[in-house]
Amino acid sequence: MFAIELLPARHGDALWIEYGDAEHPHRILIDGGPSSTITRKAIESLIADRIGAESQREHDFELIVVTHIDADHITGLLKLFENRSIVLRPRDVWFNGWDHLPSDLLGAKQGESLSAAIVRNRMPWNADFAGRAVQVEDTGALPSLDLPGGMRITLLSPTRQALAALRPVWKREVEKAGLVPGQAAADERAKQPDVLGEKPLDPKALAAEPFENDPSEANGSSIAFIAEFDGKSLLLTGDARADILSAGLRRHLQERNASRAQLSALKVPHHGSRNNLSLDLLSLLDCERFLFSTNGDIYQHPDRVAVSRVITTHDGAGLEFNYQTQFTQPWESRRVKRKFHYSTRFPADGNQWLRVEL
C-alpha cells in the first residue's frame, strides 16, 4: 500500500503519506498548512485515530518534513509541535532552520519558533544529514536513503545556493519582529541538560504563454524529493522552483541512465502556480497523475496556465484536486476533456480531503 492524502490546508500544503502493510503502515507527514482550525483538527484526528493505538511502536512517523518557511506550510506544524497534549515520536524531522543556512552569504518568525519547538520536544533534527542542512551538493550523487518499511527517498532540492539566498531574507524578517536569528533554538538548547475568466478555455494558447521563473528565496529553499515504494514513485515538491527541480531531475535521470522520470504522481509545486511548472520541467516527466493542494484563496491557484501546460503535454493526465472551487471547476468542461483527453477527481461527497492510492 502506498497512499497520499491531501488534507484541507486552504491555500497551503498538509500531506499525510502511508506505505507498507495496510494494517500497520509507515507514515510521513509533510507540512501542516496555515493557521487553520480545520487543518489542525484533521491532523490531530488522524494522529488520534490511526496512531493512538500504536504506542508500542518506536516511531509514529518515519519522517516529518517542513519543506520551507512560508506560513501556509509551516504554521500548522508549529501549532502541532507546541501542543503539549500531543506527543510526537518521529524518526527524524527535516527542516532547514537558521543554523542550516550557509553563513558565508547572507514567514522566518515561524521558522524561529519551529526551531525552538523541535529542540524543546527533543525531536531528532535533520539526523539523516548528521544534523546539517537537508540539501543537494553541487557535485556527486544525489542524497538518497531508505526509510524503514522499504521507502526510498531521493532528494532533488534545495541546493546550497538556494539556502544561501534565503539567509538575508530570514535575517531581515526575524529582526523586523525584534528577534535574533537562531536565538530561539539556542535558548531552548540552553534550557536542556545537555480565478478563471469568462472566455472559453483555450489550453493550447495558455500553455504557450511565456514562462517566468518564481524568484522567491523561500520557495527556492523548498525540500523536494522522489519517494519510491513497491514499484510506485511520487515526486513531492513543496513550493520548489522549476529551475531547481529541473536541475535536480536531470541529475537524477543521469544517475539512472534514463530520459524521463517515471512517476505515479506529482504533487504539483506551489499549488499550481504558472511560475513553478514549466514546460521544461514537464518534459522530464512521464507522469500519470497530478495532485493539486489548494482552495484558491489569496493567490487563485491552480493557475489556468499551469493546468494547461499539464494537459497539453501529458495525454491522459489525471488532475486530482483536494478542493472543488471556481478555479478547479472549469476543468470539468466536457468539451475541454474530450479535446485534451484528461480526467478530474475531487474529494468524494462527505469527505473533507482527498486520498490518492498509488
Image: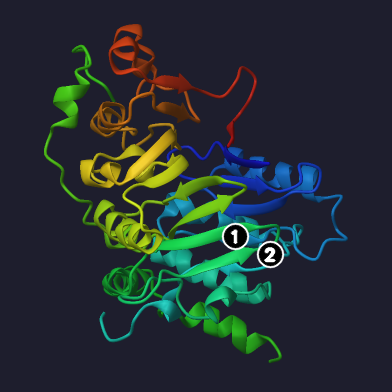
Q: Quadrant of the C terminus?
A: top right
Query: Looking at the picture, how far across and down is residue 233, in whole percent?
Result: 51, 47
Q: Are marks 2 and 1 in contact (CB under 8 Å)?
A: yes
Q: Residue at x 69, y 58 (%)?
A: 61
Location of residue 125 with respect to 311 vertically, above or below: below
Q: Residue at x 30, y 27 (%)?
A: 311
Q: How is the image coloured?
A: rainbow
Location of residue 332 with respect to 249 vertically, above or below: above
Circle 1: element type: strand
Q: Residues within 10 Å of mark 1 (few under 14, many from 20)?
A: many
The amino acid beneath tag 1 is Ile
Q: CA distance from mark 2 to mark 1?
A: 7 Å
Circle 2: element type: loop
User: Which residue in the rendered view is the most extreme toward the front?
Assistant: 257
Location of residue 143 with respect to 218 vertically, above or below: below
Query: Looking at the picture, how far across and down is residue 251, in whole percent?
Result: 33, 63
The amino acid beneath tag 2 is Pro
Query: Looking at the picture, how far across and down is residue 325, in whole percent?
Result: 42, 22
Q: Residue at x 24, y 56 (%)?
A: 243
- Front-lying residue, 210 or 302: 210
Query: Looking at the picture, how far across and down is residue 108, in whole percent?
Result: 40, 66
- In which image quadrant can residue 41 be found? top right
The residue tagged 2 is: 90
The residue tagged 1 is: 64
Horizontally, is 156 left or right of 213 in the view? right
